[in-house]
Amino acid sequence: MAEIRDLSKHVGESVTVRGWVESTRGHGKVAFVVVRDGTGIVQGVLVKSAVDESSWAAHGTLTPESLVAVTGRVKAEARAPGGYEVELSSLELLALAEPYPIQPKEHGVDFLLDNRHLWLRSSQQRAGLRVRAEVEQSIHDFFYQRDFVRIDSPILTGSIGEHAGTLFETDYFGERAFLAQTGQLYIEAACPAFRRVYCFGPTFRAEKSKTRRHLTEFWMVEPEVAFNDSAANMRLQEDFVSYIVERALERCREELKVLERDTSKLEHVKPPFPRISYTDAVTELQAGGSEVKWGEDLGAPDELKLMETRDLPLFVHDYPKAAKAFYMKENPADPRTVLCDDLLAPEGYGELIGGSQREDDLDRLKSRIEAEGLPLDAYAWYLDLRRYGTFPHAGFGLGLERTVAWITGKHHIRELIPFPRLMNRLYP
């Protein structure tokens, strides 16, 4: 049994390929079947005089997504899907598919999402998810090469990391528990053990948002590094993002071609990335007609405006303290602000990364937790990290789906996760 991706090794040989029917067509005494086996697609050619009657009859019964086994001689053919075709000596129908719901016509988004379990098989969806898989592998490789230790953080937690209003709450044997918004607090605890750590997994935000950039469940990678300050944190981020983009360009050329991505917009993504302070960003936005006021967080329209004339990711750093999370370190040069950054992607994809140097002063951290109205007892363990050997450290979180959307040029991140969870969607 051969895999389609290996057909280049079998030119001139007879092989058997097992897979699902993508399409069929016939012209008199010659017929064609395009087969997908999960590693690629190939066209099989049947000549009536060269196959037995059962093979010729089987072709006439095939429906999209029927499972078949095709046997024949491999031939290089530039015009065929995948660059090769198989001159068939036999075709065996293994499982006949019922009429397929997804047809080669325009379907509504709700219909496609209702049939997500089938939509995954289409060429665009396959290409997007292959890029996602490569990005995930490149994330692990980047950190492995730099001696980071992966720490798996809990999904159920009693300590929130972001905003209380975006929590999914559940009963935990009589206690209040939440689906994790971030693994950051937990991997901070591992820094004194390993110095460089990261977690990578699903995170949850109960945001009532229906934009193309939001999901209620998404994947995030979060590294944390002992002794890094905010400047070193941004250098790690730009190296990280550049590495991911380079890997996608190197190993996913065919997928990006299927997605019709203009890769020239990615080829110059290399460090250093430009930087602008939040204060200067507000000045620039106001000069361009925005009504944003100093002290407010930047919304999506402001981020889009900042990126209109920029073709590289942009760091916006040192946001107001009131607009950011309690764990961010106060900026000694301007106590109204914290040592943090957001990394914005070009082409309208918004924030890819949020990062900061963490507050390592026990009293300041305690005051921030109290100011946020959070229960101190739930954070006793987190405060212990400052009581027992406090240390400077910094980290960030990168949203996987937004990053893959930018790399692939896809408009909506719901297509870049196998089974998206949206405000109004828990099926399939």
Image (tube, helix red, strand yellow):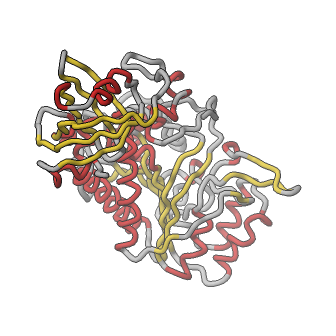
Residue under the image location 42 percent in, 48 percent down: 352
Taking depth in this image into account, of 272 and 406 the one nearest to the observer is: 406
Taking 152 as reference, is 409 left or right? left
Residue 38 location, quadrant = top left
Farthest residue to the front: give it.
53
Residue 12 % position (x, y): 11, 48
Q: Is residue 344 visible?
A: no
Q: Nearer the viewer, residue 215 or 251?
A: 251
Q: Nearer the viewer, residue 223 or 310?
A: 223
The image shows residue 420 at horizontal and vertical percentages of 54, 38
Task: List the single residue furthest toward the right.
Answer: 174
Q: Is residue 77 above or below residue 338?
A: above
Against 53, is 360 above or below? Answer: below
Residue at 50% across, 54% down: 220
Q: Position of residue 339 (x, y in %)?
A: 48, 61
Place of residue 9 in the rendered image (x, y in percent of width and height, measured from the top left): 17, 55
Q: From where the camera sits, is residue 313 visible?
A: yes
Q: Quadrant of the C terminus?
A: top right
Q: Nearer the viewer, residue 3 or 349?
A: 3
How many marks overall? 0
Q: Residue at x 45, y 23 (%)?
A: 102
Drawn side of residue 164 relative to residue 309, left or right: right
Residue 258 falls in image quadrant: top left
